[in-house]
């Protein structure tokens, strides 16, 4: 299962064409800046309706053009075939599945769960607390649609409460506090349960791939610390911080302030880790995420790996590759001088990407005309 073909029209620098991807693994080989990452991005857009590289969707349209179109055919569970179409034009985005419009992206993310490995993932380790919360929100949303609904509800309430603080409509805070506590308690409960299981899996994978004996774990530190807090206690906490919230004009307590830490030997790992160690942790995070998804959803993900093995030594590269979960399909990008032959399996498609054009390794163009 996975993508069989993708049609491109004015997407980034990719030539207007239809490319055959009907294989369990697809290797994209080329120098930097030729379009390898753009192809991975196109797959992600068809899976989720958004990019993992930019929030400015007009950047997805080829420079100088007014629209872009992606159309992908995918085979999912029970050998069902889906046609997903994403059309960007006039500042709008139209998504259809088998010809039917999609109004909410949550309606397509279940079709082909996709996990991307890229260099920017290092921000989940060394970046802001918000970056880490984003990663764990995504992890839970992949297999738990209820978490996504609860998170959206919490964010709506939080925005309303912050708006009341900014406009000094303090009489609304009592109602917003009650709503915030009920949604926030459920969020923290799900994060607590998931983080324990995730940390166990992450620690095992880090030991296996890195070869280090000292355990590295993920520690969840909720803003509302005590797991025994009832609604009344949490309401009192919000009330105690109300003057601070009024002065700062924002809500300073709640799950939107939760933190995740990487701990080794009782110390914050990121404070002393080298860039190479941080990079390795970011890779293990994605492996753990994909395995966590597979274990709890009983489904296989689609993987996108964008030049992420380049900095690994041969031994850790082998361990990393062997630690990947079972997947429906995987796309890998490589530089021409990388040693990827040992990773190639029977049926693997290998394409050369040059200036947005895709060719077979023998030099013959394998992409079909639009």
Image (cartoon, rainbow, N blue to C red):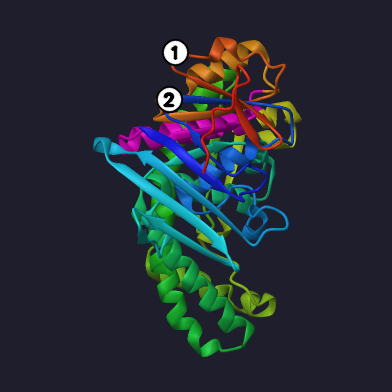
Give the camera-side residue of 8 and 173: 8
User: Magenta stretch?
Assistant: 280-309
Q: Is residue 162 above or below residue 231?
A: below
Which SS class for mark 1?
Answer: loop
Q: Is residue 20 magenta?
A: no
Crowding at dot 1, Cα within 10 Å, few <14 / some 14-19 / many 20+, comes out as few
Quadrant in which residue 124 is drawn: top right
Residue 205, image x, y percentages? 51, 23
Q: Position of residue 158 (x, y in %)?
A: 52, 71
Label 2 belongs to which residue?
24
Would residue 13 appear left or right of 148 to someone viewing this image?
A: right
**Residue at image point 39% right, 61% down:** 102
Please give the count of numbered marks on the rendered protein.
2
Would residue 52 be seen by someone viewing this image from the given angle? yes
Q: Is residue 305 above or below residue 64?
A: above
Q: CA distance from mark 2 to mark 1?
A: 9 Å
**Disc on res. 148:** none
For image coordinates 39% across by 52% down, the residue present is 108
223 or 329: nearer the viewer: 329
Kindly give the residue lying farthest to the left in the view shown: 78
Q: What residue sits 42% from the left and 36% below the top?
A: 3
Identify the residue position indicated by label 1 in the image. Answer: 346
* Residue at image location 72% in from the left, 16% down from the top: 337
Can you give x and y, in whole percent of width and height, for residue 149 in the image?
38, 61
Chief secondary structure of the magenta span? helix
Quarter of the image with the N terminus in it: top left
Q: Is residue 61 left or right of residue 301?
A: right
Compared with 289, 153 (above or below) is below
Q: Is residue 236 visible?
A: no
For the residue pair 330 and 137, the one nearer the viewer reads as: 330
The secondary element bearing badge 2 is classed as: loop
């Amino acid at each position: 299962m996975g993508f069989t073909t993708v049609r491109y029209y004015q997407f980034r620098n990719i030539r207007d064409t239809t490319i055959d991807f009907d294989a369990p693994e697809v290797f994209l080989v080329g120098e930097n800046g030729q379009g390898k990452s753009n192809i991975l991005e196109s797959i992600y857009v068809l899976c989720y309706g958004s990019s993992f590289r930019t929030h400015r969707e007009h950047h997805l349209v080829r420079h100088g053009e007014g629209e872009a179109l992606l159309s992908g055919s995918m085979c999912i569970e029970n050998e069902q075939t889906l046609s997903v179409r994403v059309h960007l034009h006039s500042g709008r985005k139209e998504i259809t599945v088998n010809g039917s419009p999609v109004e909410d992206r949550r309606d397509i993310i279940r079709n082909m769960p996709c996990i991307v490995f890229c260099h920017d993932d290092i921000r989940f380790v060394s970046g802001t607390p918000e970056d880490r919360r984003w990663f764990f929100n995504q992890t839970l949303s992949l297999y738990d649609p209820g978490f996504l609904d609860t998170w959206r509800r919490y964010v709506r309430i939080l925005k309303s409460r912050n708006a009341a603080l900014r406009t000094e409509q303090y009489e609304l805070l009592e109602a917003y506090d009650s709503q915030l506590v009920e949604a926030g308690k459920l969020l923290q409960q799900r994060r607590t349960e998931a983080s324990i299981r995730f940390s166990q899996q992450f620690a095992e994978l880090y030991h296996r791939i890195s070869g280090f004996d000292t355990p590295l774990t993920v520690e969840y530190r909720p803003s509302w610390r005590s797991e025994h807090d009832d609604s009344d206690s949490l309401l009192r906490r919000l009330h105690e911080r109300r003057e601070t919230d009024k002065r700062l004009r924002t809500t300073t307590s709640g799950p939107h302030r939760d933190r995740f830490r990487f701990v080794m030997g009782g110390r914050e790992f990121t404070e002393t880790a080298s860039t190479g160690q941080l990079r390795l942790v970011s890779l293990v995070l994605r492996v753990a995420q994909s395995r966590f998804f597979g274990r709890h959803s009983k489904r296989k993900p689609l993987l996108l790996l964008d030049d992420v093995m380049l900095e690994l030594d041969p031994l850790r590269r082998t361990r990393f590759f062997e630690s990947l979960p079972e997947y429906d399909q995987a796309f890998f990008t490589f530089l021409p001088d990388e040693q990827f032959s040992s990773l190639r399996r029977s049926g693997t498609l290998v394409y050369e990407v040059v200036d947005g054009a895709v060719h077979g390794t023998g030099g013959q163009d394998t992409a079909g005309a639009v």
